[in-house]
Structure formats: structure tokens, C-alpha cells
Amino acid sequence: MKPFTRKIPLMGTNISLYIDGKDAEELAEEAANMLIHYEQVFSANSEHSQLAMLKRAAASHPIQVDKELYDLIQIGKAHSLHEDSFLNIAIGPLIKLWRIGFREAHVPQDADIKAVLELLNPENVQLDDERQTVHLCKKGMEIDLGAIAKGYFADQVMAFFKNNGVVSAMVDMGGNVLVHGDSPSGLSHWKVGIQNPFLPRGNAAAYVSIREQSVVTSGIYERVLKQEGQQYHHIFSSTTGYPMESNIASLTIIADKSLDCDIYTTELFGLDATSIIHKVNPMKHIEAAVITKDGNLAYTDNLRGKIHPVST
């Protein structure tokens, strides 16, 4: 039984799969096909995905979608409606207006931002559980699942690996890391780096020790637009229409499910560091680490002994 690693350039990133178990190469191939299928259903940037179909037609009448897409929209809407949540699956028109991360990225006019703000209410995403349909109540609305989709994909791929009896595995969706079993070094825990938000990619600010868990980091360094001496990051406020303002450079969430990591890195990102730690501390099965803009690292009580800052 030989471990197998597969790299897949997909979804605007490099996805890495590590599998130790019987038929590892065949399982990696199946997982790659799963991920290609997910991109065809969920992509916000493809004109042929089911999500694009919703954008085109769901304002005129309810559209039936695949169960996977429906389930994720349902989960995303529920968390978008949480009190003080900064997650919003209806944020599509605002993302499209700024286009940060794409060649045509620009700072929109105030009037254009104000015009799209009224399209960002997640309550206007109407769902019918029985028919599995999605209806967007206002013309011009767009669902964007970019904040939570990769976590969902990682969980589905890992469930597939586990169902096929792999001894150990890792799914790395270009930032969403999910592990199972012992690490390749033979240790029971995996060491996962938290990106230093002030240094080039690959430089860790700290390492966390995990087992049967996922680590996801969201930060203002990931995609930026520089214009007229100002720097704009890609994490937006649905209230102002501009990038979030707080003392946070990056937020890392550790949880059993990668989807939960995605949800909480977005849902909490608009809070300051103290509020995030205070909010997550009582939560079971969720751990958090925050790096502030002035370079301080703070983390929840349940990460003590599991997180190791890199000395500079």
C-alpha cells in the first residue's frame, strides 16, 4: 500500500490530495472528477454552472437545482441571517462590481455601490424545500457561495475517502486543509501552518497541531487592489459596500468540518480580535486564532498547547 499525492489546478487554485490506502490512485481520480463536477455546478465565474443559471433566470421564476447546491444555499442563507453575521450569500452583485482578484478590478463609484446594496438582502433568497427550488425576489440579485463552497467540497471528498477505507488522507483546497488518520511522518497529529499575513505565501506565523480536523484561514492579504495609494482587500461589508474595517489581518478557524471553518471565518471577520476570541471561547468544537494588523497573535483557550508561533 503506497501513499499517493495528486495535484489538480482547479477553482482558481491548486488543489492537493494525499491518500494512504488501498486503490489510492483510483480514489484520487474519482475525487478529481467530483471536484470537476462541483465546479460545473457551483462556479460563480462560469456562465454554464447551475449558479449562473440562477443568476440569469431565478428572478423571474423559481429554479430547481441539484440537491448539493440547494443544501449549501440553505446552510449559507441560515448563517447569513444570524444576528451580527458578516457572511452573506446574496453578496454577488457587490463582488461583481469590485472584481477584486480579477484583471478588471477597480474602485466603483459611490452611486454604483449604493445601487447594489439593496440587492444584498439574503431574506430575498426564497427556498422551497419540497420542490428544491431557489427564487431570487429582486432582479439583479446574485448568489455567491465563494466564502463557503471550498469547505463543502473538502468535506465531501474526505467523506468519500473515509467511505472507501483510506488509512489517512489530506485534502488541501488551496487554504482549506482537512486531515484524516496519521500524518505522513507517522505521527498521530498533523502540523498545519497559518500563513503570515505580512510575508509572501509559504511563510507561517504559527503552526497548529490537528487530528481529524480542518484548518481554514481568511485574510486581507489574499486578494488586494491597489489604487491611488489606497489598498482594498476582498472581504466586503454588505452594509457599507466597501472592504471590512477592523484590526484583523487574518482569522483562522479549526473545526471538525471544513464547511464550519469557512462559515465562521466569514461570519466573524468583521469583528475586532477581542470580540472574536470572546465569542468563540464558549463554542465547543471550534477553535480560533487571530493575527491583528499590528502583528499580534491571539487564540482561544482550547488552542493552548496545540498552537506554536514561529519566532522571528
Image (cartoon, rainbow, N blue to C red):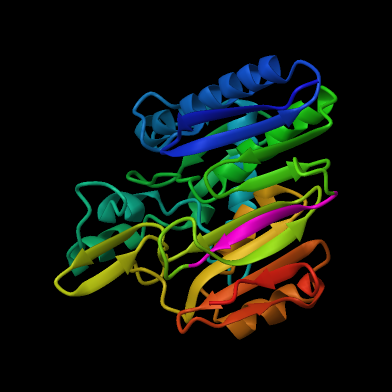
Residue 276 pos. (x, y %): 63, 77
In the image, residue 208 lies in the stretch drawn in magenta: no
Residue 176, placed above or below residue 248: above
**Residue sitting nearer the eye, 45 or 15:** 15
Question: Residue extending furthest left?
Answer: 228
Classify residue 64 by image quadrant: top right
Secondary structure mostly seen in the magenta stretch: strand
Q: Is residue 239 visible?
A: yes
Q: Please provide the residue range marked out in magenta.
A: 188-196
Say which residue appears at 82% left-offset and 43% top-offset.
Answer: 186
Classify residue 83 by image quadrant: bottom right
Residue 257 pos. (x, y %): 73, 48
Residue 155 pos. (x, y %): 70, 39
**Residue sitting nearer the eye, 251 or 55:** 251
Residue 200 pos. (x, y %): 40, 61
Say which residue appears at 67% left-offset and 17% top-offset.
Answer: 25
Specify whether 99 is left or right of 71: left
Specify whether 76 is left or right of 11: right
**Residue sitting nearer the eye, 32 or 169:** 169
Q: How many marks?
A: 0
Q: Is residue 132 visible?
A: no
Residue 220, placed above or below residue 214: below
Residue 2, placed above or below residue 277: above
